[in-house]
Amino acid sequence: MSGHVTVIGFGGRSPPEVVSLVSDLRKQNVVKTISAVRSPALPQSLLSEGCFLGSVPPPPHSSSSSPTLVLYAVPSSISDYIAHVDESNAIRSTVLSQSSAATNTHVVGFSNSEFLGGVTSSDIIIAMTSSGTPTLPPTVPSSLLTALNSLETRSASTLFSTPKDTVAVVGSGGREHALAVALSLSPRVGRVICCPGNGGTARESAVTGSTTKIENAPDCKSHADIIALTSREGVKMVVVGPEQPLVDGLANELNEACPDVLVFGPSRDAAVLEASKAYTKDFLREFGIPTSDYRNFTSASDAKAYISSLPDDHKVVVKASGIAAGKGVLIPETRAAALDAVDEIMSDRAFGAAGDTCVVEDFITGPEASCLALCDGVTAKLLPAAQDHKRALDGDLGLNTGGMGAYAPAPVVTSHLQKEIEAMCQKVVEKMRVERGIEYVGVLYAGMMLTESGPSVLEFNCRFGDPETQVLLPLMESDLYEVFEACCTKSLDKIDIRFKENTCAATVVCAAMGYPSKYPKGMTITGLDSAGDSVKVYHAGTKLEGDVVKCSGGRVLAVTGLGNDLKSALGNSYATVKKLDFVSDDGQSLMHYRTDIAHRAIKSKLRLGVMGSTRGSALVPVLEAIANNQLHAEVVCILSNRSKALILDKAPKACKSVFVSAKNKTRAEYDAECTAVLESHGVDYLLLIGYMRILSAEFCEYWKGKCVNVHPSLLPKFAGGMDLEVHKAAIDAKETESGCTIHLVTEEVDGGPILVQKKVAIDKDETPETLKAKIQPLEGLAFIEAISAHIAKTSKLTYADAGVSIVAGNDLVTAIKPYCKATARPGCDADLGGFGGLFDLAAAGYSSDETIIIGATDGVGTKLRVAQIYGKHDTIGEDLVAMCVNDLIVTGGEPLFFLDYYATGALTVSEAASVVRGIARGCELARCGLIGGETAEMPDIYAKGDYDLAGFAVGAVRKGSILPKDVGEGDVLLGLASSGVHSNGYSLVRKLVAREEGLEYDSVAPWDETKTVGESLLTPTKIYVKSCMKLIQQKLVHGFAHITGGGLIENLPRSLPSGVNAEITHHPTLPPVFQWIKRTANLEDRDMLLTFNCGVGMVVIVPRENVSTAKSLLESEGETVCEMGVLVGGSGDRVVMKTELS
């Protein structure tokens, strides 16, 4: 027979009745080909039953009389019917045409786990094998037409009936915006009322151009308000978004006050799975659901005693049992930190009553996944898995947040894991109902850790995740309102939850700068109308003021992009993100987002599968290369047709070893079953290593381009042979060389395209055994080379894909050229764009035979962080120049030219240009040319919004004039006033600012009412070149000391000869900023003098006879000069303080 089966519309379902019928038809050779339409789950199920899908076309001699079977899943919802009405019309036409003409096409409907018309699988097989008139009874077409007519009548009633249903969505975040949008798409829904909603839900109608389906009830916040609105507005369904109302019993109150209203969300008793981590851990343990080992404590001393009893290297996680706004999970690195974590939760009550009970659990590792199941109290159906990003900064660095982005489906959750996790969720719902008497209705959000031994539950949440909701709902094809209705009416098993095929979603959260710490509000959001057709912008912390949307929270927007793969989805999302901005009243850009969402999936390892029948020696080098990080790959499944094959023993920890018996199976059936196993473990690339079976045409077609084999000869020579016979053939043929070949697998044995060959010489006295011993070690190396080539081919990236913008770099060069030009001086033209900067010493007045070149390099420390947090970048470059050129003049040198290094995670031209403008200003003050620099954009090293600086100054001094010179007893120390903190000690200063309650960088400075904290701390480091060079040129000084890190006590001795010490008899009064630091940090004088400049940025060492002249000259240049003391002979402390700081 050469018949064909088409299955249509089964979505995520694989009914056993359908799978059994199709596989029987194929195994009995009734049909040769199988195709699936809108039935993505069936191919995997059929593979498990030994059937490939649609891989072998009908033979050329097949006739049109070949039997055809169409299995049609009758839509389980009105919305599904409406969405695919053309498909149902085609089915109807085919059925009607059967009544008027003889045909070998049989159309059978399927609904509620049975074939329509009262027929069985046997009846259908008989009809397909009949050579005469079709034997299916007339009830088959008539029942299908009746079902379709019923759906059409109900659909018409739904589409044209008024009023439609009203839904209330409780909450105001991005999750609730996504829920409201998805619910509004239902043809059965007329209104969606958001309680209280946000700026996005307020403007949704205007954005979509639809009627006013979505609206806000901004004053509807309390339980009483929601219940009153539900009654007043005739609400049919209430969907509760956040966890707190559920934990507080809103669902219970609604069910009692409004018994006819459907409530999507668990009761108070069911929400305990989120409200109490201790309860959940006990529940999981009682019913054998995998979770890490743990102990619950109500006493801090007991918890600490338990931790102290554990081995030193036993890492734990310490959790507040109750709800702590996502912040109650602490992951200490040491035992001491774990004990502190217990104190923080239980003694210090950092999370309030949430920490009355503390959970101490074992630390486990692996990828994390967000797995959300819809539940009706009896059934749990798992949605595609998602992965989110909790850390604020790129590279998963920075503070924990509510979530900075997410993507779905998560590739790390294979179909095998998906089934395993769904079974765990089903068990939770079942045990809650049977053992606890609690019906769980709503979303069960399982935070899963995918450990080497399998998935393990980290925690449960009783609501949709945010931002996971923003990627999951756009993927859903089914009517969300009908899905929720099924959950509320215990009929979830009757409907199919469908998702868009070959579609991925990624969302990028746009947050206010500074989030999750203190962040600004009130910025105007621009670019909201720039989203393309494949992008949806969901609002969280927004408010609508007239026609203007403004920021009102930390996480402000979630920009979701769709695409046919994850990379295109991310591209669509980021293209819109780059058009958005949060603009403050003074024009600052205050939007922050991560640039590496889905980096784990995009950069995921190649998942290797292995099929072998023997020892698998060639696998060992591959495993070693993976362990040594030479291959960005992992072996996830090793499969054999022999139960005792030694290759199965080579599986690494996280890899599955699987024996598949070939007994009583055709070649294609066996290959299909093997393929099902490989697919369930997410295999991307398949290695055949000593696999002793001929592969079917179906298998070769399925794995085309993704399956490689090793052959012990230099193909095409000696193809088809095996092991020693191949080596003997090569020797007998008088070959001078042999080797091994890695080739793609095709239906022609050993005939696929050659990828890699490794060669060895054949010696005169060679035997098959010795030749094998030479070649076999090369097979693993050849596999490594082939795998590496495949990885390189499939992971080709542009520089832009890697997060580096060449265009932005060019724009920056254009922007900063004028600043650099302004620093030109004799000897250089300060132009940019060449491979190096040139400087002419002669033009600067130096002859090469009498000149010493001096170099100095420095940075500005963590003062950078103040600039980045405060958003002021135009003075930090001046600091950079100052730190370098001030060092140069200490040697007596004149600064000639300067180069800078600017490194960032994502280049912002305006920001970088501001920094360079400051550098240029510093160069002008130092009278040196800015002749070049390097801008490095490194997204894997720095987070977006972060940058680092380094400066390089070069100067010249004439031989014989190098300082310090002739420094000795009796010399006088003159202190030159600093401009402020300069560029040292900021790690401590920032700690003090963070520690002071209510003090922010935009607060009025406690030490200067005319400036903010940020403005004052960013006062540029003073550049002393102009004044000090005059002293050098008039030969009035013996030396200088630049007071930087280490303060006066460590820097002054660097300019003193052995046996000469400094005696400080007078120190200028501490400037106000240093008085505040000393008082706030409670520092002793010596600590201050070791950390800060304390008001003196440069010390000049002057012979006593030159003091008056030097002071007059310095003061004429605008310096504030203080005579601090003298140099004395002796040993002991190099700097002796004879006075106190005041």
Image (spheres, rainbow, N blue to C red):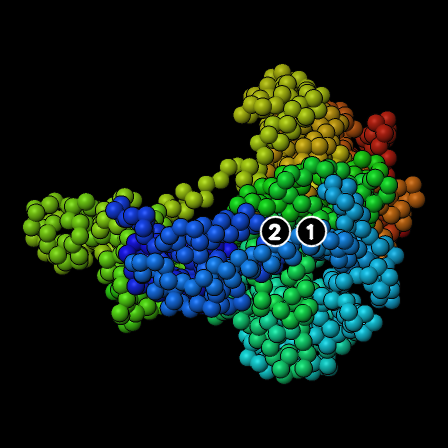
Total marks in image: 2
Label 2: element kind: helix
Vertical relation: 621 (above or below) 355: above
**Residue 485 visible here:** yes
Q: Please indicate, yes or no, whether residue 856 appears anywhere in the rendered image.
A: no
What residue sits 54% from the left and 67% below the top? 112
Count neighbours of disc 2 (C-alpha within 10 A) and say few if under 14, some if 14 to 19, many if 20 or more: some
Between 574 and 132, the residue placed more toward the observer is 132
Q: In the displayed structure, would residue 486 be above or below residue 925?
A: below
Residue 388 located left or right of residue 992: left
Percent position of residue 946, x then y? 67, 44
Earlier in the chain: of badge 2 and badge 1, it is 2
The residue that disc 1 covers is: 159
Q: Residue at x 67, y 69 (%)?
A: 489
* Mark 2: amino acid: Ile
Three-letter code, disc 1: Leu
Q: Where is residue 482 in the image (x, y as percent from the top left)?
A: 66, 60
Q: State the residue at coordinates (69%, 81%).
A: 297
Which residue is tagged 2?
A: 82
Q: Residue 1031 in the image: x percent, y percent?
A: 76, 28
Separation of disc 2 and disc 1 at Cα?
9 Å
Dividing the picture into quadrants, the one containing residue 261 is: bottom right
Q: Do the residues labelled 2 and 1 touch (CB within 8 Å)?
A: yes
Residue 28 position by quadrant? bottom left
Q: Is mark 1 on a helix, strand or loop?
A: helix
Query: Which residue is farthest front?
Result: 100
**Circle 1 Cα neighbour tier, 10 Å, few/some/many (<14 / 14–19 / ≥20):** some
Q: Position of residue 714 (x, y in %)?
A: 19, 46
